[in-house]
Image (cartoon, rainbow, N blue to C red):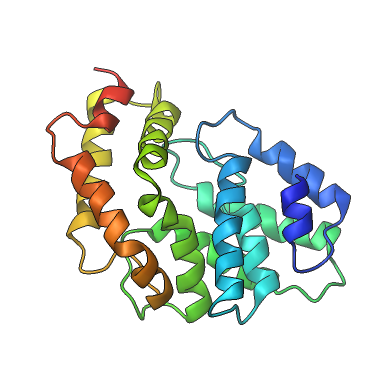
Amino acid sequence: MTIISTSAPFHLPPGLVDALAAAYAQPPRAYHNIEHVHEVLAHYADVAAGPGWSHPREVFLAVLYHDAIYEAGKRDNEARSAQLARDEIARHLPDAGIDAARVAELIELTARHGRMKAGEVDADAALFLDCDMAILAAEPARFDAYDRQIAQEYRGTMPAWLFRHYRRRFLKGLAGAPRIYLSEFFHTRCDAAARANLARVLKAPRSTLAASAGR
């Protein structure tokens, strides 16, 4: 958890960091784990060095907690993660002046990935959501690994054919949208690479995500 502590825009109590590490370890996850948080934090830092954050502390905490509770296929992961963030902020940062409601709001917005349009949320929210979706524009090998990791997380939660159906529908929805990214910053940096990855994985009837999910 050193990366999280050293990249924080304010002091993180050790108890908070330890509890966060424990949360991301349960249940074991292929993608939505602490390494995913580190990847999103790298994009958070890019924004901080670029257009900047209006409320960096709240966004930082939203990054830390946005997948703290994750069970593949569950519809309340975001709401439960948001509530955990509220509870942990109250426990570990009671006098820090953190807007816990804003942190929770940002986390809950991640439930709407792929269903929002540019201009629907404020600048911080758009950039935060785009940080989480930047994986779509990763190098092809990393994107393919991400695709396999998502399939691995869903294995055993539903029939493989049903996972493939929902996953493909989600990716096709992203590929067909006028914009994948809500902010100009990520639209400029990531749109072309994201569309190339999506086109590649969708062009075959049985894509890499299908193979990794089993038959």
Image: 75 above or below 165: below
Q: Does residue 205 appear to the left or right of 17 in the view shown?
A: left
Q: Is residue 67 visible?
A: no
Quadrant (top left, top right, bottom left, bottom right) of the N terminus:
top right
Q: Position of residue 25 (x, y in %)?
A: 66, 33
Between 197 and 77, the residue placed more toward the observer is 197
Residue 48 can be seen in this image: yes
Task: Specify whether 14 is left or right of 203.
Answer: right
Residue drawn at x 54%, y 61% as measured from the top left: 43
Nearest the eye: 67 or 177: 177
Residue 94 placement (x, y as % from top left): 85, 67
Q: Position of residue 198 (x, y in %)?
A: 24, 48
Write down the quadrant of residue 134 in the picture. bottom left
Q: Position of residue 48 (x, y in %)?
A: 61, 73
Give the side of residue 5 with respect to residue 168, left or right.
right
Between 179 and 47, the one lying in front of the other is 47
The answer to whether residue 160 is above or below residue 98 is above
Question: Considering only vertical position in the picture, is 210 above or below 122?
Answer: above
Q: Quadrant of the C terminus?
A: top left
Residue 17 sits above or below residue 71 on the image:
below
User: How many numbered circles are shown?
Assistant: 0
Q: Residue 82 sits in which quadrant? A: bottom right
What residue appears at the point 21 percent right and 55 percent down from the top-left corner?
175
Instruction: Name the residue rendered at 64%, 32% in the picture.
Output: 26
Q: Residue drawn at (48%, 56%), measured in percent from left and top? A: 132
